[in-house]
Image (cartoon, rainbow, N blue to C red):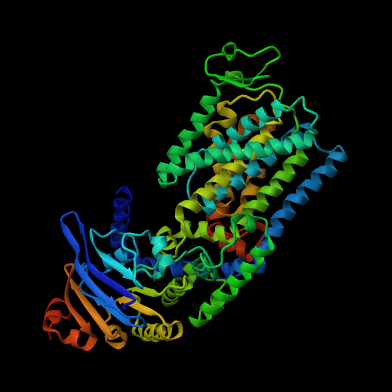
């Protein structure tokens, strides 16, 4: 019954919009004429392929350059310490772009999925810390565990939440992120010969047997996670994330997801299962955020869920990367995540003026990316492939 | 047996009987028109046929199979495809991808195969490209295959919507005011296209239209709706001369 009403509302709206529609379409035609050449280029098959290669090439190139510079000892320790977070933010931005740009739904709880992935993978590694398993294998498995845990949460949250749209979805995902963070802050988790013990009171109430270890100690978080994370692991994860998202976008399922984004009713009318594909995109997006969490939890010790690392500020930060890089533009997300993560650190020397300059750069980037006249200027004078496709084409790789 | 057999179909919104006791039989290969003043319930009939609304009572048989109250996606799989009064393209996808989206259920491969780029992915995508280009050529859209759908001129957007609907391999095609917003030249071209589609795809077509020139030109039979009720039904020429229809819809003089 709810669904019926909802559809009816939608239809009513359609009828109301009908009169304006034809005119709108005409106006839009005229407005879009200028972009025509660009779009034609962006959408030919071999061009999307080339565009993808440029994205991969950019990441590989940066990795090689950093490796060489590190060998030469030319990288200050401040920057070296940022390499893993940089990879993490790139993964987060690209994965959020799958929800925001490709699926077209606003999610403000991305840090929540990252948090789930971080703690799940850390607990997994702590459990196996004494086993003879080689560290890289254990870390790979930990990333997988983080992804699966976040995917599970993505699915559980997604089933009810994806029935909502727009602002409602944003608010519920925002709440989800905060709930995850706060729940983890009161969880005590221990491990002994009898398996896992969990409590919401204190570590004593875990009643651990002899030799048992406390993994999550309430608000103090998690200590002693093996520091398996590194620049190379982060680089591999970034490449995997890009491959998953770009290949998905250019596949049958990706087409279905973008069809739903562009027009849900039409997608249904040609037999596309809207619920299935929405949930798929949201779950994959959450899983990838979980892998970023694993990267994080194996890089920082001790690990606690604070507002700074898993709070809504973090979620909004990731959204800023996506919006500034261009919604639906995967390469843009990579570049925006790199630039905006590095920038505050590079500006540290300017102390008081730091945030002022950061804000100005945000505004300039926004104008550069979205102002129609600047976009036209860019099309004319800059090499086309530098910034990927138009922000809205959904396929700008 | 009729391809589409609608019996005693009714739906009310609140106190309003939007469609009341609607009966129609459409034979295979027929070009059937549904006309009537604004608000008569024509699009509601389409929405009932495609599962957007569930009827309060009545039965819809497609090719002898009861599809009453099924979900939109299942009805599409059973063989009904439609276009919309206000064009609903996937505007940020390319023209080619719009049609490939229509092929979604006919060239299946798993999401994982797509992400891993398995051979089945390449094979199916190649087949889809070939089939989609074939359809685009029929509608003279092949030169714009790489264009964003929203950048097509209006008339071509209408055609693309029909191509996308046909990609789902329907038995019955519903066209909701295909000539809306078109100039006389475009309408004439559209009439040709609709005739061509029927011939080439051996398609049964039910269309809603206000353009009497188009209706008189291509529809073999008509049903006229007014306030949700059928006021006339039958062979086109006869229906258009019916005094009741002239009074309610066409206007005298």
A69 to B155, vertically: above or below? above
The quadrant holding residue B25 is: bottom left
Q: Nearer the viewer, residue A114 or A120?
A: A120
- Camera sees residue A46: yes
Q: Quadrant of the C terminus of chain A?
A: bottom right
Q: Nearer the viewer, residue A213 or B137?
A: A213
Q: Residue at x 40, y 83 (%)?
A: B198
Q: Position of residue B200 (x, y in %)?
A: 45, 85
> How many numbered marks have been drawn onto this rendered protein structure?
0
A327 to B60, vertically: above or below? above
The quadrant holding residue A189 is: top right
- Camera sees residue A394: no
* B175 lies left or right of A284: left
B66 to A95, vertically: above or below? below
The quadrant holding residue A222 is: top right
A364 to B225, vertically: above or below? above
* A114 lies left or right of B77: right
Q: Nearer the viewer, residue A59 or A233?
A: A233
Q: Position of residue A234 (x, y in %)?
A: 72, 41
């Amino acid at each position: 019954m709810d669904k019926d009403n909802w559809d009816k509302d939608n239809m009513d709206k359609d009828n109301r919009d009908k009169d304006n529609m034809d005119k709108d379409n005409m106006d839009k035609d005229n407005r879009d004429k200028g972009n025509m050449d660009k779009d034609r280029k962006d959408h030919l098959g071999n061009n999307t392929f080339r565009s993808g290669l440029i994205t991969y090439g950019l990441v590989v190139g940066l990795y090689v350059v950093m490796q060489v510079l590190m060998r030469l000892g030319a990288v200050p320790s401040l920057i070296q310490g940022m390499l893993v977070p940089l990879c993490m933010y790139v993964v987060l931005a690209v994965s959020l772009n799958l929800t925001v740009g490709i699926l077209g739904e606003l999610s403000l709880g991305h840090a929540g999925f990252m948090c789930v992935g971080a703690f799940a993978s850390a607990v997994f590694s702590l459990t196996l810390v004494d086993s003879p398993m080689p560290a890289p294998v254990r870390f790979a498995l930990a990333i997988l565990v983080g992804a699966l845990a976040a995917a599970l949460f993505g699915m559980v949250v997604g089933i009810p939440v994806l029935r909502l749209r727009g602002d409602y979805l944003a608010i519920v995902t925002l709440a989800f992120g905060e709930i995850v963070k706060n729940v983890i802050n009161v969880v005590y988790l221990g491990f002994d010969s009898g398996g896992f013990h969990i409590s919401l009171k204190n570590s004593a109430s875990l009643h651990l047997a002899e030799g048992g270890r406390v993994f999550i100690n309430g608000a103090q978080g998690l200590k002693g996670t093996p520091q398996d994370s590194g620049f190379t692991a982060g680089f591999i994860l970034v490449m995997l994330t890009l491959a998953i998202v770009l290949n998905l976008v250019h596949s049958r399922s990706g087409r279905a997801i973008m069809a739903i984004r562009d027009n849900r009713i039409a997608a249904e009318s040609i037999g596309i299962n809207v619920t299935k594909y929405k949930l798929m995109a949201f779950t994959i997006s959450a899983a990838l955020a979980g892998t970023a969490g694993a990267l994080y939890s194996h890089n920082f010790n001790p690990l606690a869920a604070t507002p700074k690392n898993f709070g809504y500020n973090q979620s909004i930060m990731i959204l800023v990367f996506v919006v500034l890089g261009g919604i639906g533009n995967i390469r843009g997300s990579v570049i925006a995540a790199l630039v905006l993560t590095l920038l505050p650190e590079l500006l540290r020397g300017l102390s008081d003026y730091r945030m002022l300059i950061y804000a100005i750069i945000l505004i300039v980037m926004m104008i550069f990316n979205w102002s129609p006249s600047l976009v036209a200027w860019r099309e004319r004078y800059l090499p086309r492939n530098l910034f990927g496709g138009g922000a809205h084409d959904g396929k700008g790789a | 047996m009729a391809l589409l057999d609608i019996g005693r179909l009714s739906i009310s919104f609140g106190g309003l009987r939007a469609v009341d006791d609607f009966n129609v039989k459409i034979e295979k290969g027929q070009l059937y028109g549904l006309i009537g003043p604004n608000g008569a319930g024509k699009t509601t009939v389409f929405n009932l046929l495609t599962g957007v609304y569930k009827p309060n009572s009545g039965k819809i048989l497609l090719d002898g199979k009861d599809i009453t109250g099924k979900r939109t996606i299942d009805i599409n799989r059973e063989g009904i495809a439609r276009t919309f009064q206000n064009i609903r393209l996937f505007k940020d996808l390319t023209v080619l991808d719009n049609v490939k989206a229509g092929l979604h259920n006919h060239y299946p491969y798993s999401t994982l195969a797509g992400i891993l780029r398995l051979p089945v992915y390449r094979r199916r995508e190649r087949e889809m490209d070939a089939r989609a280009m074939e359809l685009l050529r029929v509608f003279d859209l092949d030169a714009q295959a790489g264009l964003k759908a929203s950048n097509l001129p209006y008339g071509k957007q209408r055609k693309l919507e029909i191509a996308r609907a046909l990609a789902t391999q329907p038995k019955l095609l519903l066209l909701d005011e295909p000539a809306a917003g078109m100039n006389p030249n475009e309408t004439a071209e559209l009439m040709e296209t609709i005739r061509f589609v029927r011939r080439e795809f051996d398609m049964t077509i039910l269309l809603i239209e206000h353009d009497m020139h188009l209706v008189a030109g291509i529809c073999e039979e008509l049903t006229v709706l007014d306030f949700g009720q059928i006021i006339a039904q039958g062979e086109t020429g006869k229906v258009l001369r019916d005094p009741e229809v002239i009074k309610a819809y066409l206007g005298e003089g």
